[in-house]
Image: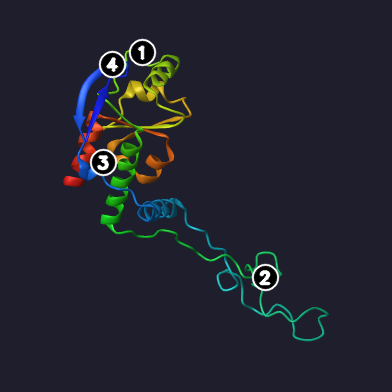
Amino acid sequence: MKVKVQTLDAADKGEIELNDTVFGVEPRADILHRVVTWQLHNRRGTARPTRERSDVARTGKKFGRQKGGGTARHGDRKAPIFIGGGKAHGARLREFESSLNKKVRQLGLKMALSSHAAAGTLIVLDDLKVVDAKTKAMTGTLTKLGFGKTALVIDGEAVENGFALATRNLSGVNVLPAVGANVYDILKHDTLVLTRAAVEKLEARFNG
């Protein structure tokens, strides 16, 4: 699959051949759903437990006589009705991390990339080097390139610093290095923007 390459000034820089095994895979909703669900589950923090009656460190001594005290017959101070006592039916420790086969995760990423390529919402840039790293100047540049309402920009080893600074205050633009490319972020943006370096890194990621 051949895609034209542009500069940040929307000038033509030739074409690039995209690997069909990475950018030409037929998307499947079930695979994408599995990968996105796995990602979001693993983002959840651990649900903290509360201390129940058996977890509270208080004396177990019977603090009053059985009869004649005019109060209920409590065995110790750990009961939930006392201040400092254990929680009745408290929350339990819950871990939300789940596992997913590596081949399914890789297939999901290929399908996410392919979905943008098939929809025509994939833009390939030569690089992200900017002369004037100003947000105002960058806004006009991105409009000229047709980035759309939301765009995910993926660079090579690291995101070019000037571009990252210029787009930092643009709510519709997010940037990632190639190593951070993931299914959820790719799918939730209207436009996917890759640099030549990002294409090389992503293709090497599956062939390595």
The picture places residue 191, in percent across and down from the top left corner, at: 39, 33
Residue 195 falls left or right of residue 83 = left
Residue that mark 2 sits on: 80
Circle on res. 184: none
Q: Are marks 2 and 4 in contact (CB under 8 Å)?
A: no
The foreground one among 160 and 88 is: 160
Residue that mark 4 sits on: 11
Disc 2 and disc 4: Cα gap in Å?
71 Å
Disc 1 and disc 2: Cα gap in Å?
64 Å
Q: Dot 2 surroundings within 10 Å: few (below 14), some, or many (20 or more)?
A: some
- For the residue labelled by badge 3, is the local secondary structure a helix, a strand or a loop? helix
Residue that mark 1 sits on: 132
Disc 4 and disc 1: Cα gap in Å?
17 Å
Going by the numbered disc 1, the residue's amino acid type is: Asp
Going by the numbered disc 4, the residue's amino acid type is: Ala
Which circle, 2 or 3, is nearer the viewer? Answer: 3
Residue that mark 3 sits on: 23
The foreground one among 192 and 20 is: 20
Q: Dot 1 surroundings within 10 Å: few (below 14), some, or many (20 or more)?
A: few
